């Protein structure tokens, strides 16, 4: 049964392919797709079938999905364009005779006020109406998202944010990738919506302590108001749209929208999720 992994030129998709191979999926039964052909070459060298596709170009999608049983739809990164892009993949999957689509969504996408949720909710609705078998992986926050903040904090000695005392149950990218691989390899979770997050939530005081431990530089967390945060980001040269997004996201964290620890991710993995310090260390080493 052929599995297509979209976004395989990105970190998550590549890790999913690698885990499928590590668990014995024959490389000829895996199709890795992405926009950049050169980035797919290392996987092709391992016997994985590859295809250059673009979510915005439907004509590239259906040929890549022909003969596949399952497609992992890794959500796109272009905010504001994702619903149309994901819709293209879903329609192509139907046209190609695909049986199942596994989608990487966001925490409680159908009910959450999370700034990222609306496009994921709309995609989940497209999947529900598609007639395809689906599995929705509602991935929580990635520890790797804090690499830029950690790098800056190591230089300034301060971690500045408007999250208040909000907590985040992050996990490492490898955790989410291995969970996706586990779902792709069986039919056990067909029809399920899985809320995935780290085993333990932490606040920004703990994040500052983790940065201190990993970098060897003392870092403290300095909470600021949303207004102060916005002014500082604008002064740093960020555009209005980016500033609005960052401040809104910090507000979501302040409101506890990324704090849940349902335990489903570690159950899928058969092990605990990667602790914050370990995940941050690995991410900074890779950066």
Image (tube, rainbow, N blue to C red):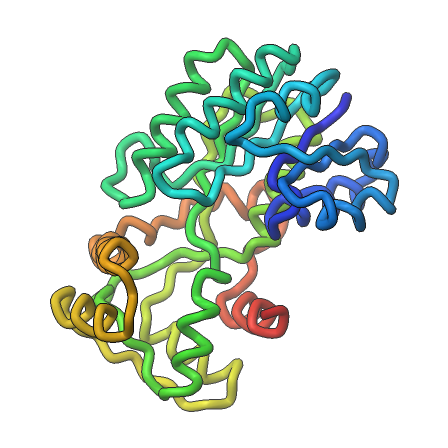
Q: Position of residue 126 (x, y in %)?
A: 41, 19
Residue 191 visible in this rendered orientation of the protein: yes
Residue 178 visible in this rendered orientation of the protein: no
Quarter that holds the C terminus? bottom right
Q: Quadrant of residue 121?
A: top left
Count of labels in the image = 0
Q: Position of residue 257 (x, y in %)?
A: 28, 49
Q: Position of residue 48 (x, y in %)?
A: 82, 38
Q: Is residue 103 left or right of residue 117?
A: right
Q: Is residue 204 left or right of residue 255?
A: right
Relative height, residue 207 to residue 194 (above, below): below
Q: Nearer the viewer, residue 59 or 98?
A: 59
Q: Nearer the viewer, residue 96 or 145?
A: 96
What residue is drawn where x is 56% and y is 47%?
176
Q: Is residue 25 left or right of residue 114?
A: right
What residue is drawn where x is 63% and y is 33%?
53
What residue is drawn where x is 50% and y is 62%?
144
Q: Quadrant of residue 40?
A: top right
Q: Nearer the viewer, residue 34 or 16?
A: 34
Relative height, residue 27 to residue 269 (above, below): above
Q: Position of residue 187 (x, y in %)?
A: 65, 22
Q: Is residue 5 left or right of residue 143?
A: right
């Amino acid at each position: 049964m052929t599995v297509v992994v979209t976004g395989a030129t990105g970190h998550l998709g590549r890790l999913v392919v690698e885990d499928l191979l590590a668990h014995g999926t024959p490389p000829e039964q895996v199709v890795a797709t992405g926009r950049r052909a050169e980035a797919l070459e290392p996987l092709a060298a391992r016997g994985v079938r590859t295809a250059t596709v673009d979510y915005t170009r439907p004509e590239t999608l259906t040929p890549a999905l022909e003969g596949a049983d399952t497609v992992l739809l890794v959500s796109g990164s272009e905010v504001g364009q994702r619903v149309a892009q994901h819709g293209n993949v879903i329609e192509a999957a139907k046209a190609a005779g695909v049986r199942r689509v596994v989608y990487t969504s966001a925490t409680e996408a159908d009910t959450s006020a999370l700034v990222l949720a609306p496009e994921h909710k709309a995609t989940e609705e497209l999947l529900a109406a598609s007639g395809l078998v689906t599995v929705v992986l509602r991935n929580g926050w990635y520890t790797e998202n804090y690499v830029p903040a950690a790098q800056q904090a190591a230089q300034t000695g301060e971690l500045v944010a408007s999250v208040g005392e909000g907590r985040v149950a992050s996990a490492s990218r490898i955790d989410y990738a291995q969970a996706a691989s586990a779902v792709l390899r069986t039919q056990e979770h067909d029809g399920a919506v899985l809320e995935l997050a780290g085993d333990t939530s932490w606040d920004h005081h703990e994040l500052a302590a983790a940065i201190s431990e990993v970098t060897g530089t003392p870092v403290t967390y300095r909470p600021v108001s949303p207004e102060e945060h916005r002014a500082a980001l604008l002064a740093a040269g960020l555009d209005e749209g980016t500033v609005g997004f960052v401040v809104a996201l910090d507000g979501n964290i302040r409101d506890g929208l990324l704090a849940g620890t349902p335990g489903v991710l570690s159950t899928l993995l058969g092990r605990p999720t990667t602790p914050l310090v370990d995940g941050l260390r690995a991410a900074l080493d890779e950066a």
